[in-house]
Image: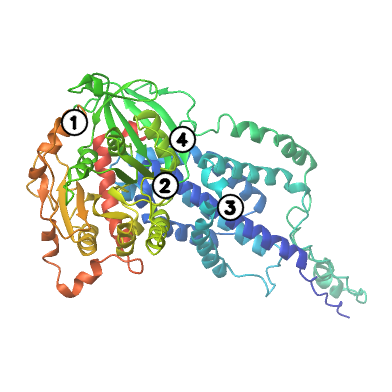
Amino acid sequence: MAPPVREPPKTSLAVVAFTRVGAILVLLGLSLVTYAYKRALEPLYGSAATNQHLAKVVWASCILGSFAPSVPISRATLGLGLLLYALPHSSYWSAVYTGRMGDPVWGTVATHLIVLLPILSLGVAIVKALQEAPYRKDDPNAPQSAMTLPVCATAVNALQGLWPALPFIATIPESQIFLQLGTVCASLWAIEPFLPNIYPPPLKAPEPAPAPPTPSGKDKKRKKGESEKAAAPTLPPPAPNADRPKASSRLRIALLPLFPFLTSTILQPPTLPKPLLEPYQHPLAPLRILSSVQSSYSGVVVVGQIIGPQKGFGDMDHLRYLRAGHSLLGGVWTGPKAQYADPSMVLKDEAGESLGDSIYSAFVLQEVARLVVKKPGNVAPKNALMIGLGAGIAATSFMRHDLDTTIVEIDQAVYDAAHRFFGLPAPGPGRLFIEDARAWVHNRSTTMTQSSTTTAPVNNDDVASPQLFDIVVHDCFSGGSVPSHLYTQEFWRELKNIVRPDGVVAVNFAGILESQSGKAIVHTLQNSFPRCRAFYDSLQPSHNYTAEFLNWVFFCTLSPEPVEFRRPVDADYLGSHLRRHVFNELPAREADVSTVLIDIPSEQRERYLLRDTANPLGDWQQKEAVEHWKIMRGVLPDVYWETY
């Protein structure tokens, strides 16, 4: 008589729920790692190069993890923890050496493959193992590997956008994210022997069949082997973790106190601590880092000072620079190069050190807005609005000329650096706003519009009341690109609501005018303002200014009258040799930028008019941002970009 067939026990719903929650937590962790990894690379590669092929690498990692052979969850968790522990060093040094090759596109791809792909692949393999763990191989309800791939890839790519919304995550150093997640993985591996078993129990051996009649003679010999084989039950292999070695379990638990010690000592990243408590002197280069802070907006904001000549980089010595991510926001000459025609006009920083002229003439070119002739009466400007601060060169000049200057800067760390290290005076009460300029301009425009409909007069001399501005300087270039939402037709319309009818708006743009983004900015400005004039900041005249990467300043007015500049006087220069040169050589730097629009057919020009609902500026700037990376690497040696 055949033994009764025993059906395998049903999969526990509690175990399935537990593994599903575990898989979700792993995916959240992988998306957090990817978000922090991007932040870690931005000081060395910038955001454009870092993001260009990242999504493709995420998909490749998920493919590898989904279709690779199943892995033991315990060992894979330990492996993932070790990779996360190494991530502060592996991401930095991989980016350093690939960056020295000089190609930001393939350099980032190589870094992604070396550093990120193993982590994501192993993490996805753990997700697949968690999904399969509660089921037997022959269970028709077991999930398929093909379903793991799209779920994991979509989750990792999509969930990254959630993390910046959490203030704690946005401000914590990315190295701490790596190390804390590594500690979580290592701790789970340590306590794993004491967790409930998530694998299905083994099938019980079938009851032996009744013994057949005893054969005799040859039948006995012939069937002896067959009967012994039939009587021996076939047992399935034991489930994983069925027998847990107690000695190794105790050793794992004993390692738990070691993990926090490692994360606070030898696993700390090779970059400088943030905030930097005291200046750092580089042992191999004439470089002193005065400040390095973590920024939720710029990644890192660094103030460095080159204290001596650097071989192969000409006269780039004795200067102080302000850096955000992989972009220079400005700088000034120091030491023996801090020279002024009038020593009494020398600017000093918070510590009393003398500061010289700007290393970039574009910021001085912005100050020419003070020289725009206001009609009628040629009344001198009284106030100014700075949208984007940088090192505060133009804002400091306006304040020294007694203009009430309002600053709108999105990054608190940038303002702090400009105030402490570049001589920016503290603005008056109610004249500093650390927020996105789009929202600020919208709110101020709404207030001004409502005020204009009331019968009560507006006192423009009262700080608490809304003001119309004589001068607006719009300088939001950073990292090789500009925030596209601050260049649309709707933004310029709202900005004009807070500018006096005879005021001037100076718009800075760094790039190539013949590029798609350059054409779009020129076309949108010309459609938003009645009059605009454009000047580039090169100290020497350019013979091919539309095809070169240059800093441009557009001076636009709300009036249909031509934009005219008065002749500068000695008081305008503030004792600066650079201001004297730029102000007096202004006519030689003017260009007719409308020539870049001639080749665009009239039916296609609508495409270059930037609107909130149709704004391809961000996509167009990707290639230009990569070129900007190469330009920045030519300005300063690699070691200066690698020290932050």
* Marks 1,4: beta carbons within 8 A: no
Q: Earlier in the sequence, mark 4 or mark 2?
A: 4
Quarter of the image for residue 444 reads: bottom left
Instruction: Tell me: residue 268, above or below residue 507.
Output: above
Marks 3 and 2, the one that precedes in the sequence: 3
Q: Which residue is mark 4?
A: 293
Viewer-nearest residue: 338 or 199: 338
Identify the residue under disc 1: 571
- Which residue, given by chain and number where applicable, does mark 2 sit on? 410
Which mark is in front, 1 or 2? 1
Vertical comparison of 354 with 386: above or below:
above
Badge 2: few (under 14), some or many (20 or more) residues near its Cα, within 10 Å? some
In this view, the residue in front, 501 or 49, is: 501
**Residue in front for this viewpoint, 455 or 230:** 455
Disc 3 from disc 2: Cα separation:
29 Å
| Residue in the image at 14% along x and 57% along y | 561
- Cα gap from disc 4 to disc 2, whole angstroms: 15 Å
Q: Could you tell me residue 172's position as x and y percent?
A: 54, 42
Compared across the picture, whether 63 is left or right of 321 comes to right
Q: Tell whether 62 sits left or right of 641.
A: right
Q: Which image quarter holds the N terminus?
A: bottom right
Task: Identify residue for label 3.
Answer: 29
Between marks 4 and 3, how big is the CA–CA gap?
A: 25 Å
Identify the secondary structure beneath mark 4: strand
- Mark 3 or mark 1, which is nearer the start of the sequence? 3
Q: Percent position (x, y) of residue 229?
A: 80, 67
Label 1 – label 4 distance at C-alpha: 37 Å
Amino acid type assigned to the residue bearing label 3 in the image: Gly
Q: Amino acid at mark 2?
A: Ile
